[in-house]
Image (cartoon, rainbow, N blue to C red):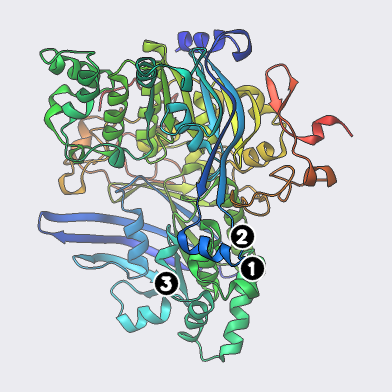
Amino acid sequence: MANSDVPTLEVRNLQTHFFTRAGVVKAVDDVSFSVRPGEVLGLVGESGSGKTVTGFSILGLVDEPGRVVGGEILYKGENIANASDERMRRLRGNNIAMIFQDPMMTLNPVLRVDTQMIEAIQAHENVSRNEAWERSRAALEQVGIPAAEERLKSYPHQFSGGMRQRVAIAIALLNKPDLIVADEPTTALDVTIQGQILYEVQKLCEETGTAMIWITHDLSVVAGLADEICVMYAGRVVEHGTVNDVLDNPAHPYTLGLINSVPSRNRRGEPLAQIPGMTPSLLNLPKGCPFKTRCPRVGPDCEIEPAITHPVTARDVRCHYPVTAGEAAAPTSEVTA
Amino acid sequence: MSAMMETGESKPAAADSKPILELRNVSKRFVKSLDAAAKIANLFGAGLKDEVVHAVDTVSMTVADGEVVGLVGESGCGKSTLGRVVAGVHPATSGDVLFRGRELSTQSSAEARDTALKVQMIFQDPMSSLNPRLRVEDIVGEAPRIHGLVDAKGLEDYVAEMLLRVGLDPTYAKRYPHQFSGGQRQRIGIARALAVNPEFLVCDESVAALDVSIQAQVLNLFMRLREEFNLTYLFISHDLGVVEHLSDRVVIMYLGRVVETARTEDIFSSPNHPYTQALLAEVPRLDTRKRKFVPVKGEIPSPLNPPPGCHFNPRCPHAHERCRVEQPTLREIAPGRWSACHLNDGA
């Protein structure tokens, strides 16, 4: 891959906190990762793990009372954390694009699709209306919308859910961004439609060298799509490595728990290994390791917050007692909530 | 664990035991009648017609006692409507629904009430299916009190027992639904269903809204309850991984019709219907890495205006002339395996 020595995006020790009346919510607390051209990074976590706020921070979309309070977001070497509104406006939708879970967050319900797409192009480039229209048509065709010329004249409500998400993706692609942040874009879609979208996205990354951050709670989608995977828990990255390494030999007990919670082929009908309890409130995290109250491997060191270590090569793990390769995972019994 | 597997395996196939539930050619149509303006327009020859959606189109199936049947399909295929017909929420437009051999519509009102208690439903979104202004003790305790399953004195203990069954602390009985997490709310919904001693649970996307680790907890709960109370499930889901894990038999629906039904092992190892094949190929799995996605073309057509012949023909890679005109019938292609596809008739 060309230019693979300069990451498209590098996030270093990012901290995004929300200053609420009830206290400071550390939604993102010391998150680091990088994506290179053509690469797909899967950002995995459950609700409240901070994965969406990480995505919003990259695009400068965090609203009051939230603020990026620490760390760097390097877009091709330029720090865009707390960049000026003007600078972000020029980057957003042009160099960095976002696809949301709900396409209606991207689409304006009272404007025709062509109006919205042409506007997105002309906001960043000085081109004629005709040329912008032509590019919009090409973008719709690229994401597999039949009769693109006709569909440009439609309003968002005239599309089905899957088609609407394609339009949102087409808008994200319009200005050929170097980086796309996709926040659960297929979660609300049917399996066959999800397959179609994943197919388009995969083709795009391969053909144009666009880097992608794919935010999801679904490990199996990431398994099929991503090169690298970051597992988040309570605002922190607890494990980071290549997809094969992390899924085959998870080192963090939370990653292992997540993998074992997914129903799998060879354990049909058996009780699923489950992580007891629930995600702690970010306002009221336990001292030390935030996972310790749910962790089967908890020990005395867990009173101190673990730092990133590398128990295996090319792997970041935030745990005092990482799982070693080959260690059998004993399914935990059902515990009352 | 092994005991569970054995009981799962030793369950008789649906065909050779008396079914707890039987559907015979059940259809459910929703009709949007013409409004006054349209009727007037018709007087002047506009030729407008009622809009009819065949949400469920002549479906026949059986569920054996103690069996878990997974009902799978994409949005708009009619799986939820079918679940509601089974649970008695919607009456069927035509066809017979038999519970323990008794036709629902011919039952006396007392019998019908009894059947309604035996079949309970668990919904997808626990927040919208629990009354936010009732305490948990009232949500769970109301039905058994009204139906005389428990007297006022014993109610508190009864509710406590139900909460324990689903793994909730009985001291939570005085709380309101908003004070619980999503997984706990789903447990409250399950406790409410169990409170009237049902035999049959219709679970409509009951774990779809939950996080993975919480989903595993609720699935385990379903499996434990099945063992303890000999429950029968109709488990409706779009998540094939969950269905494969839980079900003995799988029914696949497409646009209101059943296209294939078979034992879970059979359907996942050798799907027969092209739609089932496409559906299974699209399931993301943990052990398939960096795969090439090969999408099924097209979208689900509108149920208002389904294609003629086989409903799947516009998207089917094997469609030929006959598929566009003649509707394939669901027939047995191997013992316990039913499929509705013309390809099974040989070349």
Counting residues from the N terminus, which is met first, the one under dot 3 or under dot 2? 3
Residue A129 % position (x, y)? 56, 89
Q: Could you tell me if the residues under marks 1 and 2 are in contact, i.e. CB atoms within 8 Å?
A: yes
Q: Which disc number belongs to residue A41?
A: none
Where residue B342 appears, as percent x and y from the top left, is 80, 35
Chain to which the residue tagged by mark 3 belongs = A
Q: Is residue A337 left or right of residue B95?
A: left
Q: Image check: B106 left or right of A45?
A: right
Residue at label 2?
Answer: A200
Ranked by sequence position, the earlier of labels 1 and 2 is 1
Which image quadrant for residue A92? bottom left
Q: Nearer the viewer, residue A75 or B34?
A: B34
Amino acid type of disc 3? Asn
Identify the amino acid type marked 1.
Gln
Residue topped by disc 1: A142
Residue density around tag 3, few if under 14, some if 14–19, many if 20 or more, within 10 Å: some
* Alpha-carbon span between mark 3 and mark 2: 23 Å
How many marks can you see? 3
Residue under label 3, please give it. A108
Task: Tell me where residue A70 appears, x and y as whole percent.
Answer: 24, 65
Chain of residue at mark 1: A
- State whether discs 3 and 1 lie on one chain: yes
Residue drawn at point x = 38 percent, y = 15 percent: B111
Task: Tell me: residue B254, above or below residue B11.
Answer: below
Q: Residues within 10 Å of mark 2 (few under 14, many from 20)?
A: some
Nearer the observer, B58 or A140: B58
Q: Quadrant of residue A53?
A: bottom left
